[in-house]
Image (cartoon, rainbow, N blue to C red):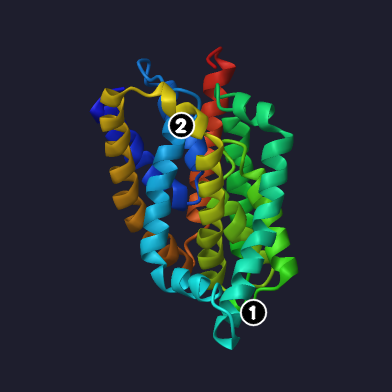
Amino acid sequence: MTLSAAVWLGVVQGLTEFLPVSSSGHLVITQHFMSDFEQPGLLFDVVLHLGTLGAVLLYFHSEVGLLLSGLRPGSEGVTGRKLIGLLIVGTVPAVIAALSFKDAIESSFEGLAVVGPALIVTGSWLLLTSKTGKGRRGLTEITTTDAAVVGLCQSVALVPGISRSGSTIGAGLMRGLDHTAAARFSFLLSIPAIVGAAVFNLKDVSSVSGAVWTSYLAGFATAFAVGYVAIGLVIRFLESKKFHLFGYYCIILGGLILGYVALGHS
């Protein structure tokens, strides 16, 4: 993999991990049109996700501090412990789905056949939730049921083309969370998901040569920087009630991919 390809994919990952347009779907599309792209398993995708994880930790450092406070005994850590519990509840469905459908999920990354329809589903979900989700509850008012529903939607986002941020933010809005709470819980929920994926793909590390790691690190740094900017963009779109615009984008792109596949490409 060339350095320029790694940087370009880092830009794609950094933007699409947080914009509700499916980072996995865009990576599949981008890599499809890069004829010289090769990687061992899904390791490079995981490296890019680790870059966006760094962006989440930095942008939401106050919330991360709250989580860390939950590790301390006593009354001061009550709120943090509650949030940790909610993140665990929200993560369990994705873990079960990943372990149960591992082979099917990995095979869905090998072509474009799944991505087109999945993007259309994402776009439709964004349009629906943007118009009907009008909650007022904040981050500290999230319930166990809220976390479970959001977690179920996150598990569906293991399919390339289904946006993790779009599905979880939309689920939060439908559950009555306000825009800020839905976004913050969604991004915090990405922490265990990304860490889990990284640990799961550590087996591929030995397949990467020292020279290639330069490109991998460049992709990581790019995804981190671009991802940090993208988080702010998502929150501004939510606050300005323009979140639905991403839905139109996903539907149009999904339709184009469907047409491309129908012409005999995969």
Vertical relation: 247 (above or below) 189: above
Residue 219 disc label: none
Residue 45 location (% of width, % of height): 45, 35
Residue at the far bottom in the pictured view: 75
Residue 80 occupies which quadrant of the picture? bottom right
Which amino acid, mark 1? Answer: Glu
Identity of the residue furthest to the top in this view: 264
Which residue position holds label 2? 43
All told, the count of numbered labels is 2
Image location (x, y in percent) of residue 141: 64, 79
| Quadrant of the rendering where the C terminus is positioned | top right
Q: Quadrant of the N terminus?
A: top left
Crowdedness of circle 1 by 10 Å Cα count: few (<14), some, many (20+)?
A: few
Report helix, strand or loop for mark 1: helix
**Residue at the image position 59 percent from the left and 18 percent from the top:** 262
Report crowding for label 2: few under 14, some 14 to 19, many 20 or more residues within 10 A (C-alpha).
many
Which is more N-terminal, label 2 or label 1?
Answer: 2
User: Is residue 94 positioned above or below 59 on the image?
Assistant: above
Q: From the viewer's perspective, is 107 left or right of 232?
A: right
Of residues 255 and 109, the one drawn nearer to the viewer in this rendering: 109
Image location of residue 88, percent across then percent down: 65, 60
Q: Amino acid at mark 2?
A: Leu
Q: Is residue 5 above or below residue 175?
A: above
The Cα atoms of the two marked residues, 1 and 2, are separated by: 37 Å
Inspect this view and state whether residue 132 appears: no
For the point 72% across and 60% down, the residue is 149
245 on left or right of 94: left
Q: Identify the residue under disc 1.
A: 141
Residue at image location 56% in from the left, 37% down from the top: 200
Secondary structure type for disc 2: helix
